């Protein structure tokens, strides 16, 4: 029937407060989805799109959901991850922050540092921020949800005794068009599928 039955809406949408089986557009997130499609159509690859979003400190889908008060958890996400790091020769807080996707301010605050001077061998804890990655961009660009189509039946359980799932071929997926408002027009979406 094209009813949304998931616990969490895809990035760019929220569940309709009046109908939990219906999605409505979440404008701030939808703007980012549009930018991703536009950048890809302009010829930017996954890496450049990620770099653009990370440099602008755009929250990843997981971070965004958490900022909205959602209890969403992604097992592969590095949100709220902490890394124990030993300072090497000629390293600065800025270099460490950039290489580990953190900020100088976050590192200083977390370690109660009063200045940016470091010593070789010093142990610091680096709070890592989630970053956009190629898989996230690939998933967004291939998700038919963004053209208003709800797709189900992508996987199937082996049996009620076995929790493993098997992937169903794309041509056998159940597609229900016009289930919710589209964020991306079909022409733009089709341009991103040529690869």
Image (cartoon, rainbow, N blue to C red):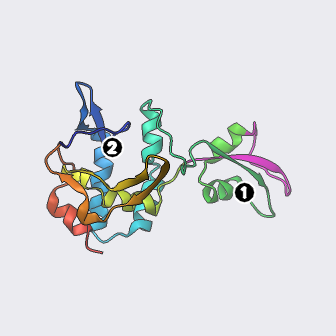
Q: Quadrant of the C terminus?
A: bottom left
Residue 29: which numbered mark, if any?
A: 2
At mark 1, the secondary structure is loop
Let me know if residue 52 appears in the view: no
Tell me which corner region of the image, top left, top right, bottom left or bottom right, holds residue 4. top left
Residue 166: which numbered mark, if any?
A: none
Task: Give the mark nearer the N terminus: 1 vs 2.
Answer: 2
Mark 1 to mark 2 CA distance (whole Å): 34 Å
| Residue for point 50% across, 40% down | 73
Where are the magenta residues, as a range? 111-129
Residue 51 at x, y percent in the picture = 46, 61
> Is 148 or 168 nearer to us in this picture?
168
Task: Please give left or right for residue 130 compared with residue 58 in the image.
Answer: right
Residue 124 inside the magenta-drawn segment: yes
| Residue for point 15% across, 63% down | 187
| Residue for point 31% across, 40% down | 28
Tell me which corner region of the image, top left, top right, bottom left or bottom right, holds residue 98. bottom right
Residue 129 at x, y percent in the picture = 57, 47
């Amino acid at each position: 029937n094209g009813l949304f039955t998931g616990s969490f809406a895809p990035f760019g949408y929220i569940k309709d407060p009046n109908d939990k089986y219906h999605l409505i557009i979440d404008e701030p997130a939808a703007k980012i989805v549009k930018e991703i499609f536009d950048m890809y159509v302009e010829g930017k690859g996954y890496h450049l799109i990620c770099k653009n979003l990370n440099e602008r400190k755009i929250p990843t889908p997981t971070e965004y959901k958490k900022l909205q008060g959602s209890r969403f958890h992604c097992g592969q996400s590095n949100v709220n991850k902490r890394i124990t790091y030993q300072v090497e020769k000629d390293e600065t807080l800025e270099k460490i922050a950039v290489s580990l996707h953190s900020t100088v301010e976050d590192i200083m605050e977390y370690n109660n540092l009063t200045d940016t001077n470091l010593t070789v061998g010093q142990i610091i804890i680096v709070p890592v921020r989630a970053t956009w990655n190629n898989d996230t961009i690939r998933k967004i660009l291939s998700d038919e949800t963004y053209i208003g189509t709800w797709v189900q039946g992508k996987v199937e359980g082996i049996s009620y005794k076995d929790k493993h799932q098997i992937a169903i071929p794309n041509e056998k997926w159940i597609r229900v068009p016009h289930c919710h408002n589209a964020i991306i027009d079909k022409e733009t979406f089709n341009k991103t599928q040529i690869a």
